[in-house]
Amino acid sequence: MKRIGVFVCHCGVNIKETVDVEKVTVELKKHPDITHIENYMFMCSDPGQNLLKNAIKEKKLDGVVVAACSPTLHESTFRNAVEEAGLNQYQCEIANIREQCSWVHKEMKDATHKAKVIIQTAVAKLKLNESLSAISAPVTRRALVVGGGIAGIQAAIDIADAGYEVVMVEKKPSLGGHMIQLSETFPTLDCSQCILTPKMVQVSKDENVKLHVNSEVEAVEGYIGNFKVKIKQKAQLVNPDLCNLCDDCSDICPVLVPDEHEEGLAWRKSIFIPFPQAIPATFTIDEDSCLGLDPIACGKCKDVCEAEAINYDAKTQIIEEEVGAIIIATGYDLYPEENLAEYGYGKYPDVITSLQFERILSATGPTNGEVRRPSDGKVPKEVAFIHCCGSRDPDRHLSYCSKICCMYSSKHAKLYKHKVPDGQPYNFYIDIRSGGKQYDEFVQQAMEEEELLMIRGKVARIYKENDKMIIHGVDTLSGKGVQLEADMVVLAMGIIPSAGTDEFAQKLKLNTGEDGFMVEAHPKLRPVESIQAGYFLAGTAQGPKDIPETVSQASGAASKALALLSSDEIFHSPIIATVDTDLCSGCGICVATCPYDARELNEAEGVVEVNDILCEGCGACISACPSNACQQKNFTNRQLSEMIKIVAAN
């Protein structure tokens, strides 16, 4: 018979306001399975933990129930405390009488009764708990970073600086992501290339970083600390070690296609360098636009390449890497412009996206930094910036705020006035969201110093009349309709997950939310960790973010990965699902059901075997098993049955 102690927390007034903790304490003293019970204001405090540890020693307790808040918050706190007092930590149970009791009831009588029942069920479970030990496994001290934008670059630098190897995978021909396309960054108006390219160079020169561009993660096997990754790298038709950037190949190439880096505002050849500061610094062949490689339809680029860097016979290859931690920094895309047909994008060349305007503003852009209309090259004297294009519109488009649009639209208006001092910018907005250091001051300065005219309202329709773009909307402050003429319109498109995020998440068995972004384990307590152990999230893969927040989260993800990589071993909860080989029929149903690939059918023995380190104890196999052979440690059928009996009797 276990000697069980129960400790009831007041949690200030969080619990005590609706649960009579004194009454609970008095009435449960009579419980035959409870050796000792007391209550305290804050059990999670140092005095509260000391009270628990002293009671374990003085009362010779061999089991503890702490009736307090959710185990998500303080289970580890109390389990560590009981271990310090000499008990196995798995002889400690949390009875959640806050979130599941006091917070959901108004009547003290009902809440008090329910609290007693919850505590009794925890006692019934604890009576049958086993003393368990954490499962351990060695750690592969290398990290994988997926994505070569600012988030991936920062995470890779932090990990490499700590002395650990990094495998970096980027699906495009160069590092840089969307940040390298920006002209300047708010609120300091730093040149994006000036602050990003040194980091790109640092990554390329670091001996601890192994860079794979034109590559994608094909598959991941294994578990936290021990992942086996297959990377699909497109054929390297131009050898980066031999290419000397002479540009002879591009000059002779007969194919012209829209330039992705310039957002379609300029043209590039089929063999090209993505942008002047590209890392790796090499030309690349776009197989989709090339006239043909199998068989060779042109071959002019190879003929003029004196460095002999071009090899048409190069093949796509699968590269295998072993890593201990994976950082997901897959970035974002813009909401599809074609979804906003009423704004005329695609129909009218002078209706452009925010990224296209960034390229127009950029000194390395299609107009060398001069603000000119795409249709005729004239300087626009009136430009309308439309906020929230696709964002904050749950009925038709994206329900969420894309977070950066107010700021970059204000930046665009400010930079436009610097380039065209006699021009007039108009900003149509719903409301200004400028939450960040010096952000509100930046917006106010744009309004006051740059004569930015702010119109609070949504734009309904945009069309062309003569040489002007006609904008119809409503000023919600005055309640009157607005009709405005402009030479050019810039759409602040919403942010969505990068293309292929859903498929990528499925490959890695990661969770995405209803908006398609990667889901963190807990928004407050574990904001950079995925629900799947060993995966960490950085930047806009997890949701809309500005550059400072992206860099901060990337460093946070790197620090979490480093904490893992710096350990000799990783430890995993022993509360896993087991297999009773005497009952197992080898049907394999649980193998197909397991979402973590933790089970494998041993055909020779005719039974299922469990990889303990992979099992997350979700219980899917237990519910699927027709033989009742699957049981979860410390959550056995017998324990659950005893708990149900307590509830049914009350």
Image: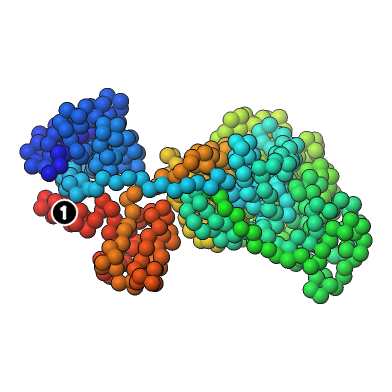
Picture coordinates of residue 496 (x, y %)? 58, 53
Describe residue 285's horizontal placement relative to residue 15 as left or right. Answer: right
Identify which residue is drawn at 29% across, 40% down: 89
Q: Residue furthest front?
A: 604
Picture coordinates of residue 456 (x, y %)? 59, 42
The relative height of residue 294 versus residue 523 in the rendered view (above or below) is below
Identify which residue is drawn at 18% across, 52% down: 643
Q: Which quadrant holds the N terminus?
A: top left
Write down the quadrant of residue 16 in the picture.
Answer: top left
Scheme of colours in the image: rainbow
Describe residue 78's horizontal placement relative to residue 199 as left or right. Answer: left
Q: Residue furthest top?
A: 47
Q: Residues within 10 Å of mark 1 (few under 14, many from 20)?
A: some
Under mark 1, the amino acid is Glu
The answer to which of 386 and 456 lies nearer the viewer is 386
The relative height of residue 611 versus residue 478 in the rendered view (above or below) is below
Mark count = 1
Describe residue 312's horizontal placement relative to residue 394 as left or right. Answer: right
